[in-house]
Image (spheres, helix red, strand yellow):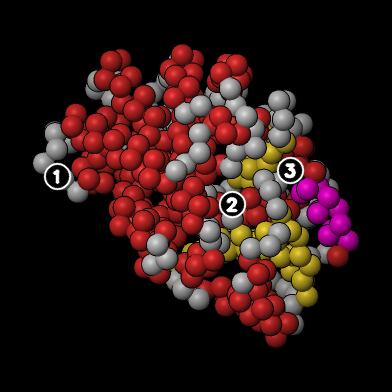
Amino acid sequence: MTEPFTAFDIARLPRIRFGNGRIAELPEIAAGFGHRLVLVTGARSFVATEHWGKLSAGLREAAIEWRQVKVDDEPSPALVDQAVAELRPWRPQAVAAIGGGSVLDAAKAIAGLLPVETQVLDHLEGVGRGIPYRGPALPFIAVPTTAGTGSEATKNAVLSERGSQGYKKSFRHDDLVAQIALIDPSLLESCPRRLMAAQGMDALTQLLESYVSSRANPMTEALAWSGMEAFRDGFFAALGGDANGHARIAYGSLISGICLAQTGLGSVHGLASPLGAQFPIPHGVVCGTLLAEATDINIQVMRRREPENRALAKYARVGRMLLEDASLADAAACDALIARLREWVERLEIDRLGRYGMGESDIPRVVADSRGGSMKTNPLVLDDDELAQLLRRRL
């Protein structure tokens, strides 16, 4: 007997333009919104490539005036508020972001606040003033240069304050979704291998967590599956510089963003929020270092407490797919999945948490601060001891 086909919702998505060379379309797209453009980039990486010169020439040819905002770390509320205060008198007509997840998140927040008279902390979840954001945002064009966060497809801008009392929270609204996402795999050619490895593990984490999420639905399951297949076939090829590999992981990253926006994630991202706020750990490293052990703990706890949980069979299907061995029984496939993920963590030399200053005494505080949004859609509820065990394995 098949499982019931339940009702589900799919939230707003950007118009997606995927393929090598699509960044060349940015000037024409921007001109469709007006001739004053805010261009948000990283501090160095993109502007050092040949693409920067071509884009600058294209913007001039389209008679677009632009002002640049550079983001060189995870964006803070102060960075966003300062950029908005400086840019608002100029009356920009659109915002474009070219960079990794931090760049896209900063741009998303800037686009959201430029037309209104509020600040980040009026709207930031959990730590803000609780004032509802009503928009409208400026048109936003997202151009990712890494394959990991999927921020080009989501409605939340993740902003951070680091330190023992730090936080990593979202400014979230449907109006913040990009109007257009330009996914150009050729932009990955200049991405350093180590960054691509960590970002790729972030994308895989988002695909796997959304696939087993308690809010997964038939549409997101199909998308996440296709993203994981693309990751399997393209990830290590991309790390070796293969152009087809770049296309596959760019697709997988995009799909991971689409899925997380619809279903939520799981324990890795629940822990990533306090870890990223309290320690200088890159988000991709957090995901990469925790994924195998989080998967193991989910599976072991489900076997003990919830053997009928649907996520167990899902994990098994993923194990058979990644191992490309359809003969594996469910239990063996789950074990093989954990072993394969551990193998990749070691092969990629993903850092442990201790390298960034986290110690045993920090575990209770991280666990206490991890019960936010992502943890709520983990396929089962993990207690504090189980989460502490997960962190302890990767100190």
Q: Which label sits on residue 326?
A: 1
Query: What residue span does the magenta drawing correspond to?
Result: 79-89
CA gap, disc 2 and disc 1: 35 Å
Q: Secondary structure at mark 1?
A: loop
**Residue 35 appears in which quarter of the rendering?**
bottom right
Q: Position of residue 68 (x, y in %)?
A: 76, 65
The amino acid sitting under disc 2 is Gly
Q: Are marks 3 and 2 in contact (CB under 8 Å)?
A: no
* Label annotation for residue 310: none
Q: Work out whether residue 12 or residue 281 is closer to the camera in this orientation and state it.
A: 281
Q: Is residue 346 left or right of residue 125?
A: left
> Vertically, is 38 above or below 7?
below
SS at badge 3: loop
Counting from the top left corner in percent of width and height, residue 137 is at 70, 55
Ranked by sequence position, the earlier of labels 2 and 1 is 2
- Residue type, mark 1 in image: Ala
Q: How much space separates mark 1 and mark 3, taking CA atoms?
A: 46 Å
Q: Are marks 2 and 1 in contact (CB under 8 Å)?
A: no
Sequence order check: which comes first, mark 3 or mark 2? 3
The image position of residue 215, as x and y in percent, is 40, 35
Q: Secondary structure at mark 2?
A: helix
Rendered image quadrant of residue 221: top left
Residue 76 badge: 3
Residue annotated with mark 2 = 101
Specify the farthest residue to the right: 89
Viewer-closest of 185 and 311: 185
Tell me the chief SS of the magenta region: helix
